[in-house]
Image (cartoon, helix red, strand yellow):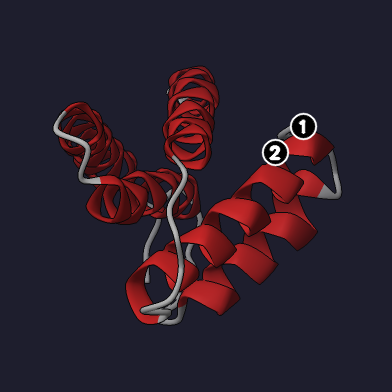
Amino acid sequence: MKMSKELGNHRLEQAKEELNDAKILFDIKSYKSANNRAYYAIFHAIKAVLALEPIDFKKHKDVQAYFNKNYISKEIFPKEMGKKIAYASKTREDSDYDDEFIVKPEETQNQIETAEELIELVEKYISKKE
């Protein structure tokens, strides 16, 4: 796996597209689907950062663990963002897999706001690297 700013930018664009999808789904009150898209926006934003290193993972938990260890704990990204990402991941899993999970619009709005915040931080991080 080689480092690639091009791949990082591609993943960031993918994250932005998923964020946009989340907002559209939120507007039509499709909250479970909006949670899913917002989470994937977060996931691909993290993967955009990892594209700048010679490393990649297939499993979501491995991506998050590496990001937490190498970026959140070192405060390259705010510690609070680590908590928000963990919450977003759990909300997405509950939305996708727990058929008794009741989605609250406020939780979905939080997912979307976390995705927006992270994408903005990742954009700044990548631009500093270029």
* Circle number at residue 81: 2
Viewer-closest of 110 and 68 = 110
Q: Quadrant of residue 12?
A: top left
Residue 43, position in %: x, y? 42, 54
Q: Residue drawn at (45%, 60%), measured in percent from left and top?
A: 102
From this view, report whether residue 22 is shown above or below residue 73: above
Viewer-closest of 106 and 23 = 106
From this view, report whether residue 90 is shown above or below residue 23: below
Give left or right: position of 90 versus 38: right
Give left or right: position of 117 versus 14: right
Would you call the spot at circle 1 few (<14 residues within 10 Å), some (14-19), or many (20 or more)?
some
From this view, report whether residue 93 is shown above or below residue 26: below
Q: Residue drawn at (79%, 36%), measured in percent from left and top?
A: 80
Q: Given contact means CB atoms under 8 Å apart, are the residues at marks 1 and 2 in contact?
A: yes
Q: Disc 1 to disc 2, how far (Cα)?
A: 5 Å
Residue labelled with disc 1: 78
Q: Quadrant of residue 47?
A: bottom left
Tell me which amino acid carries mark 2.
Answer: Met
Residue 56 showing in the rendered view: no
Q: Secondary structure at mark 2?
A: helix
Give left or right: position of 27 versus 76: left
Residue 41, position in %: x, y? 34, 44
Residue 34 showing in the rendered view: yes
